[in-house]
Amino acid sequence: METQEILTRNLEYEGYRVHSVSSVEEAIIILKNNSLDLIITDFKMPKVTGLDLIKFVKDHYHNLEIIMITGYPSIDSAKNAIKYGAYEYLLKPFTDHELLETIQKVVQKIKNRKNKQNNINDNNFMQFGIIGKSKPMLKIFSIIEKLKNNFDTVLITGESGTGKELIARALHYNGYRSNGPFVPVNCAAIPDSLFESELFGHVKGSFTGADYSKLGFFQSANNGTIFLDEISEMSPLLQTKLLRVLQNKEIYMVGSAKPQKIDIQIIASSNQDLNELIQQNKFRNDLYYRLNVINITLPPLRERTDDIIILTNFFLNKYCNEYNKSDLVLEEDIIEIFQNYQWPGNIREMENLIKRIVILAEGKTIKGVNLPDHMKYNLDFSNNYKQSLLDIEKKHIKKVLNHCHNNKTAAAKILGINRKTLREKLIKFKIV
């Protein structure tokens, strides 16, 4: 009891709020009625031991730190204390300095964790409705600030899932056209036979089934912004028509010989390398230069590791609120897994993953075992020494492509080669 009284007095002198109890039963009552950050427990106690208290706390109170002290040291007791969740293991007798130094370490750990969890609430990490504090994203924010009142055509490039539409919306809603419409068009989702009609509209009777006149996306976006997502999917014929729109600022409805003047900003995006498509005669060179007046290239998530924690917290908060699981938390190890993962599907992949694990979560903690197998450490027991280097290279390229969901840009990045070299190897190994 004397030790307990001395500890209580010393800690209160240092400014800590202390609840002093003499049994595990009393400690549990305090836990149920108070918000605590740290427990200091003895190993030897009547009826229920300090080790039992550690097990109970870790199963019922996530992020509550524990320091165990004991005058009966043993390797097993120390190993078990750490194994079951104690942050530190102190042997009696210890000095006031040793105890305070240990507590300060724990307090700093708690502060760091809370700062990480609260980062998402810091407005510095969200600009134009976009989350990011990494250097690549700060550069993007600077570009948006300069372009938001610009009326030139903008081309946004980057891998799938990096948030190209978010950038387009930021340019529109923070610029002088913000009162006008923002019309997103998924070029990859419109059949070639309907593309011209969908973009420019048609007049009644212009083709079979045209029972009435219909305005297209361009008319709908007048005095605002049209966002042509995945413009690389446009057919050569439509590319030619779009080039004329960019040059003359006018469109022709299908079935009409009368031009219509339009006043819109055109923002286009592509997840493919348009220069490569030009070399393959799949994209018009003159259209590319018309679109690429100003270029914004979005970095993949694997190059934004400083943003992974705040993005994770954002999506976790979003889906915990949506599915009424506000007490759900992630194990700290998961953040490390997320930071080391390549994210071939970028932010879209992260959002879908967190949504899925929130929906399927059992209990209050999302653990590493809840992650999909491809994010976990795997062992390879194959020892086929008869394989040639070419066979090994081919298999490795296939594995990386599969890991990246056939995203060749991401695969080339992992393999340490450029897309052209990867394409040559795919042809060489006949990998489709």
Image (cartoon, grey):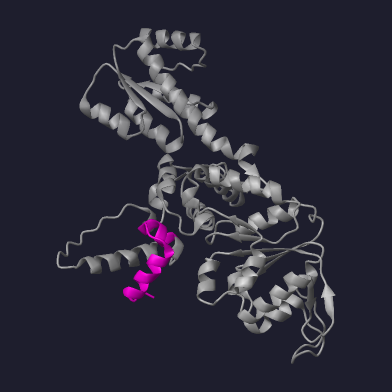
Q: Is residue 359 visible?
A: no
User: Which image quadrant is residue 56 in?
Assistant: top left
Foreground pick, 98 / 205: 205
Foreground pick, 388 / 49: 388
Which quadrant does the N terminus fall into?
top left
User: Which image quadrant is residue 417 in?
Assistant: bottom left
In the figure, 121 relative to 149: above or below? above
Residue bounds of the magenta highlight: 410-432
Which residue sits at x=45%, y=62%? 409
The secondary structure that dominates the magenta segment is helix
**Could you tell whether 378 is left or right of 328 in the image?**
left
Q: Is residue 100 visible?
A: yes
**Could you tell whether 305 is left or right of 178 in the image?**
left
In the figure, 413 relative to 334: above or below? below
Q: Position of residue 393 (x, y in %)?
A: 28, 65
**Could you tell whether 310 is left or right of 268 in the image?**
left
